[in-house]
Image (cartoon, grey):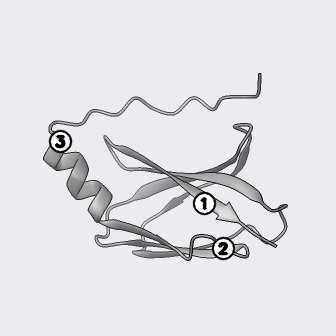
């Protein structure tokens, strides 16, 4: 069994609150050749964690800016997961990296 990162527990006060968080975040292009952008429609501080399909953490950083550019070009083609955490919510999206 692979390493599973321990993410903070999220408190979602309502389904509409989580739906708003999801709609405020775009990740593109997906699939990607390695370079992709996370567009957050607010300036909330977030922590972004990118993991591989085994759960290993590839990168983990804090951001405040609304447009975040990430680069997976040095990693092999495959499935990756991008987790975006704010104060009380977590959104995880699957990213497909092709050659």
Q: Which mark is residue 32?
A: 2
Q: Which mark is residue 45?
A: none
Mark 1 surroundings: few (<14), some (14-19) or many (≥20) residues within 10 A: many
Whole-percent x, y for residue 97 in the image? 71, 65
| Residue on which disc 3 sits | 15
Cα–Cα gap, marks 1 and 2: 8 Å
Q: Quadrant of the C terminus?
A: bottom right
Among the two numbered marks 1 and 2 on one chain, the one whose residue lies closer to the N terminus: 2
| Relative to 24, residue 14 above or below | above
Mark 1 touching mark 2, by CB under 8 A? yes
Q: Quadrant of the N terminus?
A: top right
Cα–Cα gap, marks 1 and 3: 24 Å
| Relative to 67, residue 21 above or below | above
Mark 2 surroundings: few (<14), some (14-19) or many (≥20) residues within 10 A: some
| Relative to 60, residue 35 above or below | below
In this orientation, which residue lies closer to the viewer: 62 or 22?
A: 22
Whole-percent x, y for residue 63 in the image? 48, 64
| Residue on which disc 1 sits | 95
Q: Horizontal placement of 58 versus 60: left or right?
A: right
């Amino acid at each position: 069994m692979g390493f599973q990162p321990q993410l903070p527990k999220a408190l979602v006060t309502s389904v509409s609150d989580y739906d708003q968080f999801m709609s405020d975040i775009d990740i593109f292009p997906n699939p990607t050749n390695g370079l992709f952008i996370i567009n957050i429609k607010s300036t909330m501080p977030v922590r972004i964690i990118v993991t591989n399909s085994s759960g290993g953490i590839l990168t983990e950083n804090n951001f405040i800016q609304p447009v975040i550019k990430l680069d997976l070009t040095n990693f092999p083609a495959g499935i990756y997961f991008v987790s975006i955490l704010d104060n009380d919510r977590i959104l995880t999206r699957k990213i497909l990296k092709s050659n």
